[in-house]
Image (cartoon, rainbow, N blue to C red):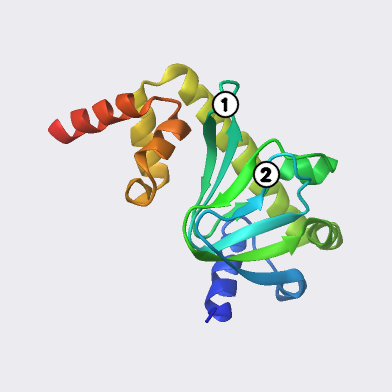
């Protein structure tokens, strides 16, 4: 059974961590929310599909991934409990998504229609403030840090940043996925982990 009260409380806490949300605005969001159970390996968005939904992770773990030129896959992001997940460019431009979003574990998510969500933002100043601060942190600050890290940091430094950013995640996902996210080979990641265990 889905614990809707607990999940909605987590959702509101997450929103408020960026900017305070009024009861009226939150009630509007609740009106467009659908609770959804997801299975391990389930695709929420497929590559080439035009995305129309955004998701909030209540329980479980989502990943976004895309195909590389050599036919492999690269992990773009991990979405833990308390985080929003979406193919935002696809939704904004109504174009096919360049990556997929997949559930790594069984879990529970909140699902929202993007156009309804966007209209609520246009209609409420507090949601506009949330939206701006969310985009500033996720799309600008964190993306810039990651781009610089990939260009300047060693594999060890990137792995330590990963452990800090995603505490406990190294025990929830295969090392292959972590290596993909960090832009290293599984062998390189194994060497990094062995080196850190020795020190």
192 versus 127 height, above or below: above
Q: Are marks 1 and 2 in contact (CB under 8 Å)?
A: no
Q: Residues within 10 Å of mark 1 (few under 14, many from 20)?
A: few
- Residue 60 is left or right of residue 84, and the answer is left
Between 196 and 22, which is closer to the camera in this rendering? Answer: 196
Q: To which residue does mark 2 refer?
A: 135
Residue occupying the point 70% across, 75% down = 23
Q: Which residue is mark 1?
A: 71
Residue beneath the point at 63% across and 35% down: 140
Q: Residue at x 54, y 68 (%)?
A: 10
> On the picture, is 120 further left or further right than 53?
right
Height in image: 152 above or below 58? above
Q: Residue furthest front?
A: 71
Whether residue 199 is visible: no
**Sequence-wise first label, 1 or 2:** 1
SS label for mark 1: loop
Residue 128 shown left or right of residue 176 in the figure: right
* Viewer-side residue, 92 vs 125: 92
- In the picture, measured across the screen, residue 24 lies left or right of residue 57, that is right
Q: Nearer the viewer, mark 1 or mark 2?
A: 1
Depicted 20 relative to depicted 173: above or below? below
Looking at the rendered structure, the number of numbered marks drawn on it comes to: 2
* Residue 108 seen in the figure: yes
Identity of the residue furthest to the left in this view: 198
Image point 81% across, 44% down: which residue?
Answer: 92
| Quadrant of the image containing the C terminus | top left
Q: CA distance from mark 1 to mark 2?
A: 31 Å
Provide residue 47's location: percent of width, then percent of height.
69, 40
């Amino acid at each position: 059974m889905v614990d809707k009260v607990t999940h909605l409380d987590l959702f509101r806490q997450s929103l408020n961590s960026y900017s305070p949300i009024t009861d009226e605005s939150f009630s509007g969001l609740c009106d467009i929310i659908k609770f959804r159970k997801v299975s391990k390996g389930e695709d929420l968005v497929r590559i080439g599909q035009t995305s129309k939904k955004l998701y909030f992770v209540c329980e479980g773990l989502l990943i976004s991934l895309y195909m590389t030129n050599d036919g492999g896959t690269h992990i773009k992001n991990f979405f833990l409990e308390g985080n929003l997940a979406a193919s935002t460019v696809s939704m904004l431009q109504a174009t096919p998504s360049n990556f997929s979003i997949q559930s790594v574990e069984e879990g529970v998510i909140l699902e929202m229609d993007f156009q309804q969500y966007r209209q609520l933002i246009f209609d409420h100043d507090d949601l506009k403030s949330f939206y701006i601060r969310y985009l500033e942190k996720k799309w600008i600050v964190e993306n810039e840090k990651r781009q610089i890290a990939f260009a300047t940091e060693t594999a060890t430094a990137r792995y330590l940043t990963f452990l800090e950013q995603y505490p406990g995640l190294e025990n929830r996902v295969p090392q292959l996925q972590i290596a993909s996210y960090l832009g290293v080979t599984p062998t390189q990641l194994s060497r990094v982990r062995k080196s850190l265990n020795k020190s």
